[in-house]
Amino acid sequence: MVIREQLLSAVDGLHGVAAADRLCEACVSAFDVDAAAISLVFDGVNTGTLGCSDAAARRYDEMQFSLGEGPCLDAVTEQMHILVNDLADLEERRWPMYALAMVDLFVRGVFALPVAVGGESVGALDLFRARPGPLSRDDHAGAVVAAEIAGAALLDLLDSDLAAAVANPDSSAWADLHAVSRADVSQATGMLVAQLGIEPAAALARLRAHAYSSGRSGSEVARDILGGQLTLEP
């Protein structure tokens, strides 16, 4: 396939985050979309942005973490393609807060495809477009290829022992990857539990709410909490 060769050429010689960023940039160039991101998702929670085509794409992706809802979360949870032709459609009620926020950012179309490693869906390739309308058949097929390549970029982030364990369903690979990717957010949530005397779910909601209200990513807020630069009031 020409598109596969084009995408592989874009990431040739790159690994991990660098490969993920370049792959997202290649998606914008190859498909009729305006931005692209690759997000990590565990337990139905967007835990970080692995790669993005630009700063706007990162903001679109992190918005799902801040609000706790969005196409990429459903793509991973349901292990299926979530193709949203128009977030402003009055019949589109799956993500009321996310849809409103994205339309305010002039994003109408969102297309999310699961990213798998070793048969396990651990993230999503998200494509964003300013104008409404469906992906073309060729662009959809190309996005499927891009999601496969994104899995390789994610695998590069694992150390050699963990990478070897991915093929073994009885290993602790996924638990280890979960812990690594969620480290900042989990630790910050624990700090809020102790500081505010609230339940973990409420602490995570407070972190998300602050991220959304301040226009920052959840991971950025978590690092500030851990570093002592930010203290949330009871």
Image (cartoon, rainbow, N blue to C red):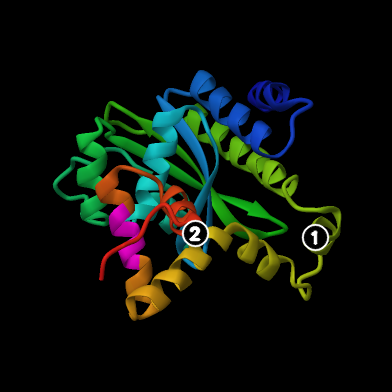
Depth order, front residue of 224/95: 224
Q: Amino acid at mark 2?
A: Leu
The image shows residue 97 at horizontal and vertical percentages of: 22, 53
Magenta highlight on residue 159: no
Residue at (36% x, 80% y) in the render: 199
As drawn, is 117 to the left or to the right of 69? right
Q: Main secondary structure of the magenta part?
A: helix
**208 sits left or right of 161 in the view:** left
Return the x and y of residue 144 as percentages of the image width and height. 57, 39
Q: Are marks 2 and 1 in contact (CB under 8 Å)?
A: no
Q: Quadrant of the N terminus?
A: top right
Q: Residue at x 45, y 70 (%)?
A: 191
Identify residue type, mark 1.
Answer: Leu
Label 1: element kind: helix
Viewer-nearest residue: 103 or 114 = 103
Look at the image and tell me whether residue 87 can be seen: yes
Within 10 Å of disc 1 (Cα), the crowding (few <14, some 14-19, many 20+) is some
Above or below for 14 versus 66: above
Callout 2 crowding tier (Cα within 10 Å): few <14, some 14–19, many ≥20: some
Marker disc for residue 121: none
Quadrant, the C terminus: bottom left
In percent of width and height, residue 60 lies at 37, 39
Magenta-highlighted residues: 205-210
Q: Residue at the spot x=49%, y=53% of the render? A: 223
List the single residue furthest toward the left.
90
Res 162 label: 1
Residue 186 lies, in percent from the top left, at 51, 67
Residue 165: image quadrant is: bottom right
Q: Is residue 101 left or right of residue 125?
A: left
Q: Which residue is mark 2?
A: 226
SS under mark 2? helix
